[in-house]
Each structure stands twice: as structure tokens, then as C-alpha cells.
Image (cartoon, rainbow, N blue to C red):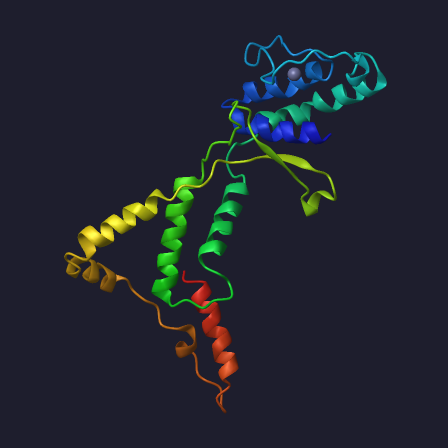
Amino acid sequence: MKSIRNYIYWTAATSTIGPERVAKWTSILNHVQDVHSHDDPLFPKCLHPLCITTDKRKWMATGTPAFCKLEKILLNKRILKAVAKLSPHHQTSSLEAFHGVILRFALKNVVFPFLGMLCRLYLVALHYNENADRAQASTSTGKPLYKLQFPKARKGECRAKPIKTDPTFRYVANLMDLIFNQVFVDPAPFTQELLKIPIPEDLCSQYERPEGGHRRLCFTVQFGCCLNPT
Ligand SMILES: [Zn+2]
């Protein structure tokens, strides 16, 4: 079940046309029988490394009740139609990763002024763009590295997560170059650009202050505004 669930994501992420998605999807029925080459030219064989099985019981066999049940589900017309339409886009994991980087650059429990927050968000974008597509790390012999994870949502079920290569920080060197070679030499044009950025008023100064100076209330409003510069 878990492998088939993962496989549906892989099918969506690696295919360009509907029939290719269906070919990959239906190949599961061969794969579970230890058959890894398929009739469909759009997906003629499995991409995993082949290993020789000594224990045939680990695979399914045609005609068994379990296989018939799986076949009925996988080849269900409505499922096939849905598989053909799977989209590789709109997966939220990269957005979640981006939000994770924001939290590292702009701690939630620290209040930043508008420009400070803006700069931090720019840094987040630079760091994320440089590191979003990092390759998987490997051993000196070229074996890809994984780590075991036990996500809370999966209730003790573990999964192997690829270990990425270390992040790079070339954008830092580029920024230092800019600062020392251009900004320090002639700051005027940079200052002018900076002054053009419209800075919104603090939220709390837009509202009427309640009688008796309830400063704590005002602080809460301002805190919210600084965390959400948009
Ligand atoms: Zn296979």
C-alpha cells in the first residue's frame, strides 16, 4: 500500500502526457509479480535496479484473490481516468520548504522593522533559489545517501529520505562583492533606491488608541504587522 501510494506521486512527477502516466500506473501489476519489463512502449521497463529473487513468495501471482483485488482497483476506469490527469504541479512540499527557510531567517518571536523584514525575505529568496534543487549526497563509492525518518503524521511508519548535498552560500559572496565594491564606493544611487520603497505605516498608528493607554493591545497589533509585511 505504502509503495503504491509513493508510486502515484512518482508517476505524476515524472510523466509529461496522460498515456505515459497510465502506462507507468498499470506497470505496477507486472512489478508485483516480479516482472519488470512491460508491453507498453511508453514505459517498457521498470527504472529500479533489478535484483534476483530467491523467495518467490515475496511476489504476487496471477489468479490469486489478492492479485485479482489489486487488479480490479488499479484498472478501475475512474481511477485510470484520474491517473491520466495527475498534475506534476501544485505539490505543496516546495512551498512548505520555502516557509521553513523563512522561519530560519526571520524568527517568529522577534519583531523586525518593515525594511529589516523585507531584507530578510529577499535573503530567504536568494538562499532558497540557490539551494532548492540540491542533488542527493553520495558516499565516496558513489552510493546515494538516505536517512530514516519517522514523521509524526505517519504514526511510527518510517521512510527513507534522500540526504541532500550541503547548502551553498554563493549569494553571500555576491552580496559582499556588491557592498564592498559598489555600495561603499558610491552609496548615493543605492540610498535613492532604498528611499523609493514605500513603507506602510504601523498598524497601531492607523487605529485609535483606546482610553487609558492600553499599551499591551497596541503592541499586539504592531507585532502582527511586522511579521506580515505584505
Ligand atoms: Zn519493477
Which residue: 41% across, 66% down?
A: 112
Is 41 on the left-hand or right-hand side of 64? Answer: left
Q: Quadrant of ligand 1?
A: top right
On the question of residue 32 being in view, the answer is yes
The spot of residue 9 in percent (x, y) is 60, 31
Residue 2, quarter of the rendered image:
top right
The spot of residue 58 in percent (x, y) is 78, 18
Q: Which quarter shows the C terminus?
A: bottom left
Residue at far top of view? 39
Which residue: 64% across, 30% down?
A: 6
| Residue 33 drawn above or below residue 21 | above
Residue 53, quarter of the rendered image:
top right
| Residue 183 drawn above or below residue 12 | below
| Residue 213 drawn above or below residue 98 | below
| Residue 218 drawn above or below residue 81 | below
Q: Nearer the viewer, residue 187 or 71?
A: 187
Is 1 on the left-hand or right-hand side of 113? Answer: right
On the question of residue 85 being in view, the answer is no
Residue 65, quarter of the rendered image:
top right
Q: Nearer the viewer, residue 139 or 218?
A: 139
Is 11 on the left-hand or right-hand side of 211? Answer: right
Residue at far right of view? 65
Q: Nearer the viewer, residue 88 or 96?
A: 96
